[in-house]
Image: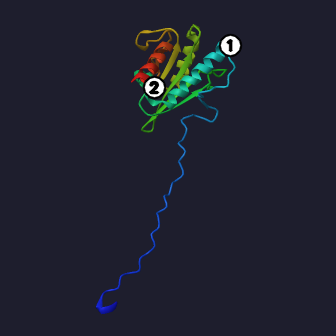
């Protein structure tokens, strides 16, 4: 007790700022099937010597932008049955097929609620035509691996995403694979619409 019966005040404690604790970022697990899958790059290192190089570069740039701009990728893939979710894109993936592996130009993977949606991408530039046997091989690979779609991307315009090549679909397979087409004009249109709005 202080003077004249007053209760004593507790000694004031020095004020200290609380330290903000930041936890390290958890690295999200990649959607790649294995370490050999390379993420699509915005600035690929290919030399533009051939049509193949041009296709690789165009595919890599497009898929990289799709992975980084969800609104853009959603505009392009929603019509193909892809869910809205975390997207990763890959280029020049080697997939087993008979005696020799096949290399689609790209792979799109979307994860939502623990489920994966996967599409193989075959690209043509400079007016080059799609090869039915190549697309057929990708359809077979996709069916065997449980992927949902094969997307072709060329300068040709098709009605409502309908395919430009005829492929045989094995109706005995339990897993169905959809074949879709996208034109470079539609890609450019969707990019312009997104920029404007």
**Percent of width and height locating residue 131:** 58, 9
Question: Image quadrant for the N terminus?
Answer: bottom left
Q: Residues within 10 Å of mark 2 (few under 14, many from 20)?
A: some
Name the quadrant containing residue 171.
top left
Residue at x 54%, y 25% (from the top left corner): 63
Is residue 125 found left or right of 188 in the rendered image? Answer: right
The residue tagged 2 is: 72
Precedes in sequence: disc 2 or disc 1: 1
- Number of numbered markers: 2
The disc at residue 25 is none
Choose between 1 and 56: the one closer to the eye: 1
- Residue beneath disc 1: 50
Q: Give neighbour class at mark 1: few <14, some 14-19, many 20+ (Cα, 10 Å).
A: few
Q: Is residue 146 visible?
A: no
Q: Quadrant of the C terminus?
A: top left
Instruction: Name the outermost residue toward the bottom.
Output: 4
Measured along the vertical axis of the image, is residue 190 above or below residue 87? above
Location of residue 161 in the rendering, given as x and y in whole percent from the top left corner: 43, 14
State the residue at coordinates (41%, 22%). Answer: 196
Above or below, 58 against 127 in this view is below
Q: Which one is in front, 58 or 106?
A: 58
């Amino acid at each position: 007790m202080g003077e004249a019966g007053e209760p004593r005040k507790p000694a004031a404690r020095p004020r200290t700022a609380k330290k903000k604790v930041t936890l390290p970022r958890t690295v999200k697990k990649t959607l790649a099937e294995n370490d050999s899958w390379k993420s699509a790059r915005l600035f690929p290192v290919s030399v533009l010597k051939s049509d193949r190089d041009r296709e690789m570069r165009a595919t890599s740039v497009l898929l990289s932008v799709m992975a980084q701009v969800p609104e853009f990728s959603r505009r392009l893939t929603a019509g193909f049955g892809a869910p809205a979710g975390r997207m990763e894109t890959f280029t020049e993936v080697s997939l087993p097929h008979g005696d020799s592996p096949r290399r689609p130009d790209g792979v799109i993977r979307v994860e939502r609620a623990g489920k994966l949606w996967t599409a193989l991408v075959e690209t043509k530039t400079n007016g080059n035509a799609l090869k039915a046997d190549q697309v057929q091989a990708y359809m077979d690979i996709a069916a065997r691996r449980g992927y949902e779609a094969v997307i072709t991307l060329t300068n040709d315009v098709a009605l409502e995403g309908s395919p430009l090549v005829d492929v045989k679909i094995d109706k005995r397979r339990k897993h169905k694979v959809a074949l879709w087409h996208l034109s470079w004009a539609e890609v450019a249109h969707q990019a312009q619409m997104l920029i404007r709005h």
